[in-house]
Amino acid sequence: MTHENFMRAGLTEAQKGDLPYSAILVKDNQIIVRGFNTAQTDNDVSAHAEINVLRSFTKQKKNYSLDVFKEYTLYTTCEPCPMCAAACVWAGVSEIVFGASIEQLIAIGSEQIDLSCEALVAKEFQDIKITKGILAQECLELFKK
Protein backbone atom coordinates (compact mmCIF):
# COMPACT_ATOMS: atom_id res chain seq x y z
CA MET A 1 0.00 0.00 0.00
CA THR A 2 1.12 3.55 -0.70
CA HIS A 3 0.44 6.91 0.88
CA GLU A 4 -2.01 7.53 -1.96
CA ASN A 5 -3.95 4.33 -1.20
CA PHE A 6 -4.39 5.25 2.45
CA MET A 7 -5.32 8.82 1.55
CA ARG A 8 -7.97 7.52 -0.86
CA ALA A 9 -9.44 5.53 2.04
CA GLY A 10 -9.38 8.77 4.01
CA LEU A 11 -11.19 10.64 1.23
CA THR A 12 -14.00 8.08 1.42
CA GLU A 13 -14.12 8.29 5.22
CA ALA A 14 -14.19 12.12 5.17
CA GLN A 15 -17.54 12.09 3.36
CA LYS A 16 -19.17 10.56 6.46
CA GLY A 17 -18.36 13.45 8.79
CA ASP A 18 -19.85 16.80 9.74
CA LEU A 19 -17.00 18.43 7.86
CA PRO A 20 -14.76 16.70 5.31
CA TYR A 21 -11.95 15.71 7.63
CA SER A 22 -10.87 12.14 8.22
CA ALA A 23 -8.08 10.27 9.95
CA ILE A 24 -6.78 6.77 9.46
CA LEU A 25 -4.32 5.05 11.80
CA VAL A 26 -2.02 2.60 10.05
CA LYS A 27 0.58 0.10 11.21
CA ASP A 28 2.44 -2.45 9.08
CA ASN A 29 0.44 -1.42 5.98
CA GLN A 30 -2.85 -2.24 7.71
CA ILE A 31 -5.61 0.20 8.60
CA ILE A 32 -6.15 -0.13 12.35
CA VAL A 33 -8.74 2.61 13.01
CA ARG A 34 -10.75 4.95 10.76
CA GLY A 35 -12.47 8.12 11.85
CA PHE A 36 -14.06 11.37 10.75
CA ASN A 37 -15.12 14.72 12.19
CA THR A 38 -18.14 14.54 14.53
CA ALA A 39 -17.87 17.92 16.28
CA GLN A 40 -21.34 19.06 15.24
CA THR A 41 -23.06 15.70 15.74
CA ASP A 42 -21.47 15.23 19.17
CA ASN A 43 -21.69 18.90 20.20
CA ASP A 44 -18.01 18.55 21.05
CA VAL A 45 -15.50 21.07 19.71
CA SER A 46 -12.71 18.54 20.21
CA ALA A 47 -14.32 15.76 18.13
CA HIS A 48 -12.00 16.26 15.18
CA ALA A 49 -11.18 13.20 13.08
CA GLU A 50 -7.68 12.84 14.51
CA ILE A 51 -8.89 13.08 18.11
CA ASN A 52 -11.68 10.57 17.41
CA VAL A 53 -9.18 8.07 16.00
CA LEU A 54 -6.73 8.51 18.88
CA ARG A 55 -9.56 8.11 21.41
CA SER A 56 -10.90 5.02 19.68
CA PHE A 57 -7.50 3.37 19.54
CA THR A 58 -6.59 4.05 23.17
CA LYS A 59 -9.98 2.72 24.27
CA GLN A 60 -9.36 -0.47 22.26
CA LYS A 61 -5.90 -0.86 23.77
CA LYS A 62 -7.01 0.26 27.25
CA ASN A 63 -3.75 2.19 27.32
CA TYR A 64 -2.78 5.78 26.67
CA SER A 65 0.98 5.64 27.27
CA LEU A 66 3.29 7.34 24.78
CA ASP A 67 4.66 3.97 23.67
CA VAL A 68 1.32 2.61 22.41
CA PHE A 69 1.47 4.68 19.18
CA LYS A 70 5.09 4.00 18.24
CA GLU A 71 5.40 2.74 14.65
CA TYR A 72 1.91 4.03 13.78
CA THR A 73 1.21 6.48 10.96
CA LEU A 74 -1.75 8.85 11.09
CA TYR A 75 -3.21 9.84 7.70
CA THR A 76 -5.45 12.91 7.54
CA THR A 77 -7.22 14.54 4.62
CA CYS A 78 -6.17 17.94 5.93
CA GLU A 79 -3.22 19.09 7.96
CA PRO A 80 -3.91 18.61 11.66
CA CYS A 81 -4.91 21.79 13.49
CA PRO A 82 -2.74 22.77 16.49
CA MET A 83 -5.03 20.85 18.88
CA CYS A 84 -4.80 17.67 16.82
CA ALA A 85 -1.09 18.07 16.13
CA ALA A 86 -0.47 18.42 19.87
CA ALA A 87 -2.59 15.31 20.51
CA CYS A 88 -0.41 13.43 18.01
CA VAL A 89 2.67 14.59 19.91
CA TRP A 90 1.17 13.42 23.22
CA ALA A 91 0.17 10.13 21.59
CA GLY A 92 3.64 9.65 20.14
CA VAL A 93 2.65 8.69 16.60
CA SER A 94 5.67 8.06 14.41
CA GLU A 95 4.43 9.84 11.29
CA ILE A 96 1.68 12.22 10.20
CA VAL A 97 0.71 12.16 6.52
CA PHE A 98 -1.75 14.77 5.28
CA GLY A 99 -3.37 15.97 2.09
CA ALA A 100 -4.42 19.63 2.05
CA SER A 101 -2.44 22.10 4.14
CA ILE A 102 -3.75 24.67 6.60
CA GLU A 103 -2.44 27.31 4.20
CA GLN A 104 -4.48 25.83 1.32
CA LEU A 105 -7.61 25.67 3.49
CA ILE A 106 -7.20 29.33 4.48
CA ALA A 107 -6.76 30.24 0.80
CA ILE A 108 -10.21 28.79 -0.04
CA GLY A 109 -11.87 30.57 2.88
CA SER A 110 -11.88 27.87 5.55
CA GLU A 111 -11.39 29.24 9.06
CA GLN A 112 -8.20 27.80 10.49
CA ILE A 113 -5.58 28.60 13.13
CA ASP A 114 -2.59 29.60 11.03
CA LEU A 115 0.02 27.39 12.70
CA SER A 116 1.41 24.50 10.72
CA CYS A 117 1.57 21.00 12.10
CA GLU A 118 5.25 20.93 11.17
CA ALA A 119 5.98 24.08 13.22
CA LEU A 120 4.19 22.69 16.26
CA VAL A 121 5.83 19.27 16.04
CA ALA A 122 9.27 20.88 15.66
CA LYS A 123 8.89 22.46 19.12
CA GLU A 124 7.88 19.29 20.92
CA PHE A 125 9.67 16.34 22.50
CA GLN A 126 8.66 13.66 19.98
CA ASP A 127 10.42 12.90 16.72
CA ILE A 128 7.45 12.75 14.34
CA LYS A 129 7.97 12.55 10.60
CA ILE A 130 5.66 14.82 8.57
CA THR A 131 4.69 13.94 5.00
CA LYS A 132 2.52 16.54 3.31
CA GLY A 133 0.58 17.16 0.14
CA ILE A 134 -0.63 13.62 -0.59
CA LEU A 135 -3.63 13.99 -2.95
CA ALA A 136 -3.93 17.58 -1.71
CA GLN A 137 -6.14 18.78 -4.57
CA GLU A 138 -8.56 15.89 -4.10
CA CYS A 139 -8.74 16.66 -0.39
CA LEU A 140 -9.43 20.35 -1.10
CA GLU A 141 -12.25 19.42 -3.48
CA LEU A 142 -14.17 18.01 -0.50
CA PHE A 143 -14.48 21.57 0.83
CA LYS A 144 -15.85 22.93 -2.43
CA LYS A 145 -18.96 20.75 -2.49
Image (cartoon, rainbow, N blue to C red):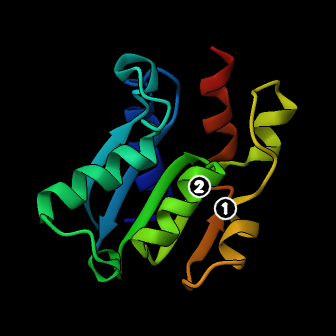
Residue that label 2 marks:
98
Q: Residue furthest right?
A: 107
Which residue has dot 1 on it? 132
Vertical relation: 142 (above or below) 104: above
Question: Residue 61 sits in which quadrant?
Answer: bottom left
Q: Which residue type carries mark 2?
A: Phe
Classify mark 2: residues with Cα within 10 Å, few (<14), some (14-19) or many (20+).
Answer: many
Q: Quadrant of the C terminus?
A: top right
Q: Left or right: where does residue 30 sit relative to residue 51?
A: left
Q: Amino acid at mark 1?
A: Lys
To which quarter of the image does residue 78 belong? top right
Q: 19 or 61: which is nearer to us?
A: 61
| Residue 141 vertical position relative to residue 119 in the rendered view, above or below | above
Image marks 1 and 2: residues in contact by CB distance under 8 Å: yes
Relative placement, left or right, of 4 versus 47 is right
Question: Which label sits on residue 119?
Answer: none
* Percent x, y of residue 131: 62, 68
The quadrant in which residue 93 appears is bottom left
